[in-house]
Image (cartoon, grey):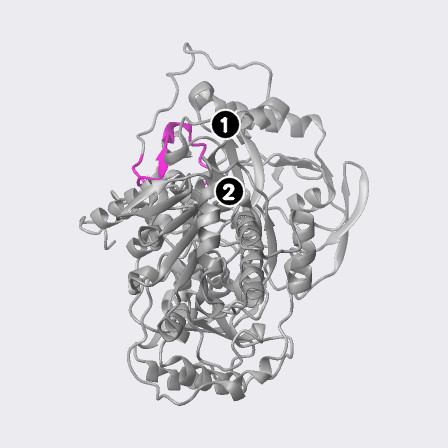
Amino acid sequence: MFRRRNELFTLCNIFLKTQIRTQTNEVNIFINGKSINVPSYFTILQALRRERVTIPTFCYHDRLSIAGNCRMCLVQVEGMWKPQIACAMPVGKGMKIRTNSSVTKQAQEGVLEFILADHPLDCPICDQGGECDLQDLSMRFGSDRTRFTEIHFTGKRAAEDKNLGPLIGTEMTRCIHCTRCIRFASQVCGLDVLGTSGRGTDMLVGTYVDKKFFSELSGNIIDLCPVGALTAIPYRFKARPWEVKRTNSIDVTDATGTNIVLNYRFDRVLRVLPRENDEVNQEWVSDKGRWAIDSLEMQRLVTPMYRKENCLCPIEWDCALKMTANLIRCTNPCKIMAIAGPYCNVETLVAAKDFLNMLGSDHAYVERDLTYTSTGIDIRAAYSLNINMKDILKADKILLVGTHPRFEAPVLNAWIRQAYLFNECDIYFIGPKCEFNYYVNHLGQDASAVCKASEALRGAKKPLILVGVSQLETPNGGPMMCALSNIAACFKGDPEWTVLNVLTREASFAGALEGGWKPGALSAIKMYGPSILISLGADDIFYDWNPPPGCTVIYIGFQGDRGSECASIILPGSAYSEAGGIFLNVECRAQYALPAVTPPGKARHDWKIIRALAEYSGICLFYSDENSLCWRLAQVSPNFVNFGEYQKKLFNELIPPFIDTSQRISGPVDVDMKTLKDYYCSDTFTYNSPTMVRAQKAVVEFATSSYAAI
């Protein structure tokens, strides 16, 4: 409790947009002679932006606290003897603001002149060139000449570069002391690693001790930096902004559905940037989503192959499809099974299930189990986040059961941290010791600690219970969810507020269950013993199960791993950057990812492979292009084509009566990713990424240093 209060006290101020306002009176002000009415709690900068009046800024950011130290947003206010900073100056009744006066223009020119006097002229080799705020503002608001000469000045300021790790490169001589990186690290990441020392021209931004900046959201400080002081090491010297093309996409490294932009050139994805979405990821992206893209070039499957005497031999598509179709036609449909991997888009999932159903098989499974309730996949609320992600801000008490959202869903964890900071939310946790970036009340590691949850949440007006999807695979899943459902039933204040939620991890999980796929692949394999197993990029299942001699594995995917090692026939598919498609996030919100590059070699889109395979097998799927497939998706579930909107969950009250309570609550509650080391290489996609491997090694090495515990 005291730790949280101290952390709140150290913040200079809080986000003006997230404050709870008790006074909504409007005041009349004048902007460049125009009379307007704005809320009384607005700052001048907010009023200017609402009226679309351009005002330059460096240090101000909508999602960070106000610093007011760059002085770039100086404006003239009549009655005040000097220009005022617009970002921190509240509006007043009758205030007359001028942004186009000679005083304002001279002040802005002077600020830019001071900054450029110490800024190095290395634009030709700076990765920020072309998307640098200092370049843009100097061209628009700066002077066309400089008074800087070596005669009157001792030379440019120089600063020593800092080692922030293998992901973030520093050129601290370029730093203009906007302190965005410091505020982001402290307020969003929860790490007081960065800070300032000295004053004036001697001011330095960096770490107080020799400590690196390791966080699951660390890459966002590169986007926040208005100059080239912080750059991405994996992207360094690869391309200029005007050389790359941009495509909107969705991050598939977790289930939050983070909106991203893919930058690519010469049919190669070079960079991932966040795309603003106020209801999902705001404008952040996780480090795995940003830097694991080099995995797209590792261990790629580029040609069809078949197994001959323990060797995989390349063949043509026609032969591969004929061979696969002959196997399928000669097999009892009840012995044909498909397993969906974590990166499948909805188009592939629907096409594969249609193919199996028309063969006469209903064995379509995902790798995750979900046996805690007999409702299965019939009710969406049984396997999803049942509130809008942005509404987490309203929670006053949160209980985490067997889930570590900081690493399982970093973007969602940023919402939890905002609730902790700005809504004074108390957070409770049942599970092992983990690295959180907010204070957590640990109720215990054993599943029996669920009994303490009722007392912990007592008195809450808007409580939240987040249960990790991995806990629903264990024998404790049923009795644990039953106990939590009874606790959630005690809170009936707001009918729009759902207390009990499931936090999923795979990008394809919600889409697969929405399309009719069933959970529990491993249990189904042991029960039915398939003769043909079609793996749609599923690799984890083969770490727990080895195919018997009588089982033929057909692998459709883009990356060679455990699944392709066990496969008899490999049909190379496409990654999310090449195929795009529809993905449902943890809220079951449908979002569309556009394709950026073409698949390498002879690889093809997964759903097109299944469509061709069906034709070779004598099955007619009544769609052959994306338009007709879209009609089929709408038939399966209208939610698939209702893009971008949050869908309210229904029938929550029907789930508790069907929960399996045959077991007793006992045993420890565990999570897979406890520390940052576990986060960087947690699945097939990331441990094939050289960048993520380097980051993991750096974290392990840093853990042995003298400053690791500080």
Query: Mark 1 is on which residue type?
Result: Phe
Determine whether label 1 and label 2 are within 8 Å by CB: no
Up-down relation of residue 332 to residue 329 (above or below): below
The secondary structure that most of the magenta stretch takes on is loop
Residue 645 picture location, percent across and down:
66, 59
Seen at 44% across and 56% down, the residue is 327
Seen at 25% across and 46% down, the residue is 697
Q: CA distance from mark 1 to mark 2?
A: 19 Å
Q: Nearer the viewer, mark 1 or mark 2?
A: 2
Residue 368 is covered by the magenta coloring: no
Residue 197 picture location, percent across and down:
34, 40
Residue 172 is covered by the magenta coloring: yes
Up-down relation of residue 211 to residue 588 (above or below): above
Which class describes the residues within 10 Å of circle 2: few (<14), some (14-19), or many (20+)? many
Decide if residue 45 is on the left or right side of residue 370.
right
Seen at 29% across and 60% down, the residue is 543
User: To which residue does mark 2 refer?
Assistant: 604
Seen at 56% across and 60% down, the residue is 355
Decide if residue 492 is on the left or right side of residue 564.
right
Look at the image and tell me in which quarter the N terminus lies: bottom left
Residue 575 picture location, percent across and down:
47, 45
Up-down relation of residue 685 to residue 146 (above or below): below
Decide if residue 546 is on the left or right side of residue 386.
left
From which residue to which does the magenta span run? 162-180
SS at mark 2? loop
User: To which residue does mark 1 refer?
Assistant: 266
Query: Mark 2 is on which residue type?
Result: Arg
Q: Is any part of residue 540 visible from this angle?
A: yes
Mark 1 or mark 2, which has the lower sequence index? 1
Which class describes the residues within 10 Å of circle 1: few (<14), some (14-19), or many (20+)? few
Residue 269 picture location, percent across and down:
47, 35
- Which quadrant of the view contains residue 523? bottom left
